[in-house]
Amino acid sequence: MNGVVEILMKSRKPPLMVDSLSAAIRRIVPNHEKERFLQSRLAAIQAGYAGELVEDRIFENYEFSFPYMIFHDLALYSSSQFQIDTLFITSSHAVVLEVKNIAGALTLRNNPPQLIRTLENGQTASFESPVSQLQWKIELLQDWFAHKDIHLTVIGAVVLALAKHPVSAESAEVTFLYPTRIPSYLRRLSSPPSELRPQQFSLLSEQLLQGHRDFIPKSICESYTLTSSDFRSGFFL
């Protein structure tokens, strides 16, 4: 390929659940047992989106010297639907970036796979392992490529939006990055023997966009086992 092809193929939109949860919190009956839970879910989703925007700004302010394409918040289907925070495509690599924005000291465990967050006050909480999430998405993208007879190396990394929080891991199965290190990581990737030809590279962008399906979340009532009686009716400003 000659020249630099810099294409933002798909931008990021705010999560649909933000508006749904905000409305549910405004309308839920006073002192409802699930009010705090809904508030915590909203805060987590907003924090996740804020972390993704931190990563997006890195790409907005950096240019690579080789052809590439960027897809934010890409949802595809192979054996099941899966969503990729950011997919960075070159003629030789598909790089899946899984973004996490979790405050506190983070510890990754392998058995069972989980992420333990410890706050300054000593309070702990467990989350699904970002390593497992990333590996699952890589496998599903590999399946998606195989189904379309696309031969492209798929790798990935976990991006931690907050560089000030320490991370410890039992093993280094995947790469962990802070946002400012993303360009260096992508530039240093070694090229495999086979690469996509320019026509294949262009066709891949069309196939990915055609394969994208906006993720439509379940209703608040279905997601969190609520009924219409749990909410106040009428007009709200």
Image (spheres, rainbow, N blue to C red):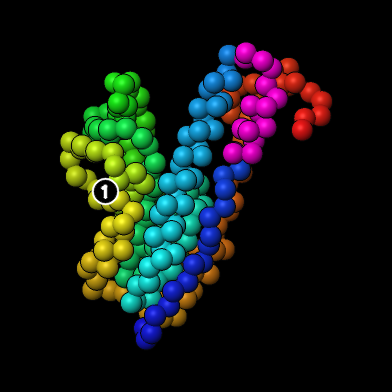
Decide which of 101, 98 is in the foreground and name it: 101
Q: Is residue 78 above or below residue 61?
A: above
Tell me where residue 228 sits by quadrant.
Answer: top right
Q: Position of residue 9 (x, y in %)?
A: 51, 66
Q: Is residue 235 left or right of residue 140?
A: right
The span picked out in magenta is: 17-32
Q: Position of residue 92 (x, y in %)?
A: 31, 70
Q: Amino acid at mark 1?
A: Phe
Q: Is residue 221 left or right of residue 195?
A: right
The local crowd at label 1, few if under 14, some if 14 to 19, many if 20 or more residues have their Cα within 10 Å, is many
Farthest right residue in view:
234
Decide which of 137, 108 is in the foreground and name it: 108
Residue 146 visible here: no
Secondary element at image label 1: strand
Farthest bottom residue in view:
2
Residue plotted at (44% across, 57% down): 56
Residue 28: say if magenta: yes
Q: Main secondary structure of the magenta part?
A: helix
Tell me where residue 113 sits by quadrant.
Answer: top left
Residue labelled with disc 1: 176
Residue 73 visible here: yes
